[in-house]
Image: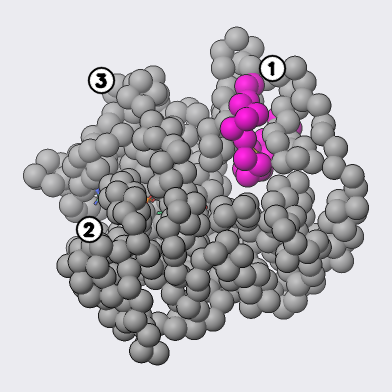
Amino acid sequence: MPVLKADFEACQGYGNCLTGAPDAYDIDDDGVVVLLKQEITDEERPRIEEAARSCPVSALTVEDS
Amino acid sequence: MTEGPTVVVVGSSVGGVRTAQALRSEGFDGRVVLVGEEARLPYDKPPLSKQFLAGSWNAERVTLLTEAAADKARIELRLGVAAERLDVAGRQVVLAGGERLDYDAVVIATGAAARPSPWGARSGMHVVRTMADSECLQVDLRRDGHVVVVGGGFIGAEVAATARSLGRDVTVVDPLPAPIGRVVGAEVGAHFAELHRRHGVATRFGTGVESVEGDVGDLRVVLTDGTELAASTVVVGIGASPNDGWLADSGLLVENGVVCDEFCRAVDAPAVHAVGDVARWFHPDHGEHTRVEHWTNAVDQAVCVAHNIAHPDDLHAYRPVEYVWSDQYDWKIQIVGRPHRATEHHLVGDPAADKPRFAALYRGREGQLGAAVTVNWPKALVTCRRLVTAGAAFGDAVTQIDALAAAPARTVATPA
Ligand SMILES: Cc1cc2nc3c(=O)[nH]c(=O)nc-3n(C[C@H](O)[C@H](O)[C@H](O)COP(=O)(O)OP(=O)(O)OC[C@H]3O[C@@H](n4cnc5c(N)ncnc54)[C@H](O)[C@@H]3O)c2cc1C
Ligand code: SF4
């Protein structure tokens, strides 16, 4: 199953990822992204990949496990 | 080479690149050709006035698409060649040099260009739009001497902050008394003006520029009130205009951008789509044609256009809530919605504090939360973005953000 990865150091709290995939990404009180799940299904991959690409600092990736 | 329909994307910055990538995510299996005037690999623009200009990020860090990533997504790169004309009836993009690319669908993503300086000095004048612009300015910012920034909008303010961080003396000039006030309202805008002063940057707001003369290292900026500022470098950030000149004889409706319907298809030419800074599409919730020069808009619109090309029988209207960020000095500024349309606002937190964390909430015409401006407070922004999207009542939004301010900051653990 595809796996979600995040670079927590790079994240700037822009919050773009939450808009496209609120089921996969959230943000904590310090403004850092939180992964709500680790693995996703192939069906949800396109949508979550688009949300990951909406990150202005490329902090998010979807990788093949 | 893949058979099947061909999509030609013209413009290789964030709007174009994200459209090409999203076509694949949306299951489009034909050819995708990405045409770009600049020979460099596609790169991102926001860092050009911030980290890249400061020298802390290099070219690799701002690359949007590597050759390997393009190969993997089967995106054919045609970089270093401009599109010169669009033949709508013949469904062809005509490149400089005369080559014609056939398309089944074309995406116009040619963005915008910096409005050029109306003042002619011989050298030492800069705009910031391309990586080459930012590189040239970087060289001049390393010279000793005074930097004058003309234009106190987002890009001007960011360049001023970056120049200051490099140790330069900086003055920002703008004919408006509170330049960012045009976006966020006069009262909140005044705090943005104060931010410059707090960081030792002089402002001459409410004063225009009459002329700029001289050469790099020895420039004179004459203001409309007669004052003369000596400068070694002048940066002009007075806005941008859409790159739609190449479409002049296409027959498309072009009026300050490519005019599109709510599905981002050009009026009377449904195989032609536009995304990003160059697109002026009909926003169904605003009930008017809208052109937005913000990064997130280009990315979101790219996804919508890619969907509409891949699934023509399931068209999505594009109805985003505007969102933009800007980094100035120690302020991380985030804006959601259209604050300039608001009737009143409510402040949570103290903008005058040292490295403040605050939010300004704006009431919309129907008593909803219409917009929000946050500084150093991503959590509040994300909350407001959801509330604006949901059309939440202004009063409820104020209660929620007040509660957020009262809650002690805590860190939510991230699953390992
Ligand atoms: C210095 C700077 C800082 C910014 N900071 C922020 C920020 O902090 N937050 C934010 O939200 N937004 C910011 N923006 C705005 C954001 O970068 C733009 O909204 C975004 O780049 C728009 O993307 P685009 O692809 O539509 O257009 P552009 O980025 O303008 O790209 C258009 C591309 O098309 C190419 N092109 C043009 N004409 C032709 C032609 N005829 N043939 C082939 N190719 C052509 C150009 O070379 C260019 O590569 C900033 C912009 C700049 C310049
Ligand atoms: S979009 Fe990127 S920077 Fe923004 S919260 Fe998500 S991961 Fe962080």
| Secondary structure of residue under mark 1 | loop
Label at residue B1: 3
Label 2 within 8 A of ligand 1 by Cβ: yes
Prevailing secondary structure class for the magenta stretch in the rendered image: loop
For marks 3 and 1, give the one nearer the viewer.
1
Label 1 within 8 A of ligand 2 by Cβ: no
Few, some or many residues within 10 Å of mark 1 (<14, 14–19, 20+): some
**For the residues marked 2 and 1, what is the alpha-carbon distance in whole angstroms?**
46 Å
Q: Which chain carries label 1?
A: A
Say which of B111 and B350 sits in front.
B350
Residue at 20 percent of width and 63 percent of height = B123
Res B396 quadrant in image: bottom right
Residue B312 falls within the magenta-colored stretch: no
Q: What x and y, as percent, mark residue B260?
A: 42, 60
Residue at 28 percent of width and 75 percent of height = B220
Residue at 37 percent of width and 65 percent of height = B146
Residue at 77 percent of width and 37 percent of height = A28
Q: What x and y, as percent, mark residue B68?
A: 35, 20
**For the residues marked 2 and 3, what is the alpha-carbon distance in whole angstroms?**
29 Å
Few, some or many residues within 10 Å of mark 3 (<14, 14–19, 20+): few
Q: Name the residue under label 1.
A: A39
Q: Do the residues labelled 2 and 1 touch (CB within 8 Å)?
A: no
Q: What x and y, as percent, mark residue B172?
A: 45, 70
Label at residue B246: 2
Q: Mark 2 lies on which chain?
A: B
B84 in relation to B409, above or below:
below
